[in-house]
Amino acid sequence: MELNSKKFHIFVVMILRTAHKRLVFLARKFKAVAVTGPRQSGKTTLVRKVFPRLPYLNLENPDTRRFASEDPRGFLSSYPSGAILDEAQRVPELFSYLQEILDARKKTGRYILTGSNHFLLQENISQTLAGRIGYLQLLPFTSHELFESKKLPASDDVLMLKGFYPPVYAQRIPPTDWYANYIRTYVERDVRQLKNIGNLYAFERFLRLLAGRHAQELNYSALAVEAGLDVKTIQAWVGLLESSFVVFLLKPYYRNFNKSLIKRPKIYFYDSGLVCYLLGIQNKNHLRTHPLRGSIFEGMVIADIIKHIAHKGLYANSFFWRDKTGHEVDLILEMYGKTMAVEVKSAQTFQDPFLNSLKYWKKLDGKSMGYVLFGGHQSFKRTDQIQVMNWKANETLIKK
């Protein structure tokens, strides 16, 4: 089912993106701005809304791409006042000529580049446009954006199933059908473009196996054995998913505290709806009893925090912490000289054991602020200086 582009554009514009302010700020400071993020995260809609007077050029279009590739100087000279260059990484020949044009004039916000693959766009920019361009990551909706637009499902289970991609909220088809098409498009377009993967069935199987490790430690060797592939291939494919904003890795916190620490990273998908689809979860009753429900919930909350940070243009180092005796903190954030330790619990009823990991952590690092984000609606502060709140209030955490 094809989505009517005009209807989709109107729908997404109704939802004010947090990244809107950051994009305007960058365009006032830099001669060009690069907006990166996964396919279907709303990049095109956002930049066209913020810069309605700039000509829009989609470099996925074969004719436009051919003109830009064969005659980059002539192509850019056709738009002397600037333009929006969608999927700019498709024509790397443009970047050297773009550098010359940007250096010739002091005007800011002339060219807005978008790209659905961070690696290719970053590689081209770092070689030619360093110091001339600002960066913004636009990821799928946050819970706050959905809440403000009155689109947030009342049930966490429904939200996990639907995920956060804008088209899911604009189409009246089941999320499973949309995600099936998304995977098919991603495999056919991006994977073939970025990696010469001959066996697409093996790649799709690898995706499903990876979803089964969502919010868990990533053991490349074990995954390689299960997938029937070598470790180097697994590492390359995980890197491909990272650069395409499908997954992200949390590295273990590096401070030792004289403890034996886990050294492997944890793997997270940015979108819970995609995880549910890959795991074959099709309805909320199935999700409620699924053994990975807690992991899916944890991933949804941590990804939501990561998206908040990205859309506001903030800078944070993100980790998890676990020692070999079983003590663990789901998320450690270092932002502007402060450290926050976050535990995520899917239960709706608060229980004192939820605090155990943070209490142990605060004995090691007493300066950290501690937070328990859970599925219940209570919000209170413990005497041990640990804040308990509903997970959808995580924007408050970022503000602090």
Image: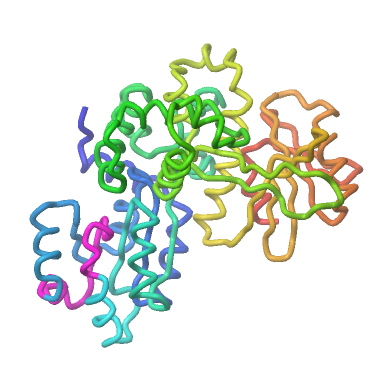
Q: Is residue 88 magenta?
A: yes
Is 321 left, or right, of 110 in this rendering?
right
Q: Is residue 119 above or below residue 220?
A: below
Is 126 left, or right, of 96 in this rendering?
right
- Identify the residue at image location x=42%, y=78%: 131
| Residue 196 position in % (x across, y down) | 28, 43
- Identify the residue at image location x=61%, y=46%: 250
Is 259 left, or right, of 310 in this rendering?
right
| Residue 258 position in % (x across, y down) | 87, 51
* Quadrant location of the C terminus in the rendered image: bottom right
Q: Residue furthest front?
A: 230
Residue 65 is drawn in which quadrant? bottom left
Residue segment shown in magenta: 74-94
Q: Is residue 121 above or below residue 320?
A: below
Q: Is residue 32 magenta?
A: no
Residue 10 is drawn in which quadrant? top left
* Quadrant location of the N terminus in the rendered image: top left
Q: Exactly how many numbered labels are in the figure?
A: 0
- Identify the residue at image location x=74%, y=60%: 338
State how the image is colored: rainbow
Q: Is residue 79 above or below residue 90?
A: below
| Residue 70 position in % (x across, y down) | 9, 66
Residue 320 is drawn in which quadrant? top right
263 or 339: nearer the eye? Answer: 263
44 or 279: nearer the eye? Answer: 279
| Residue 4 position in % (x across, y down) | 20, 37
Is 311 left, or right, of 94 in this rendering?
right
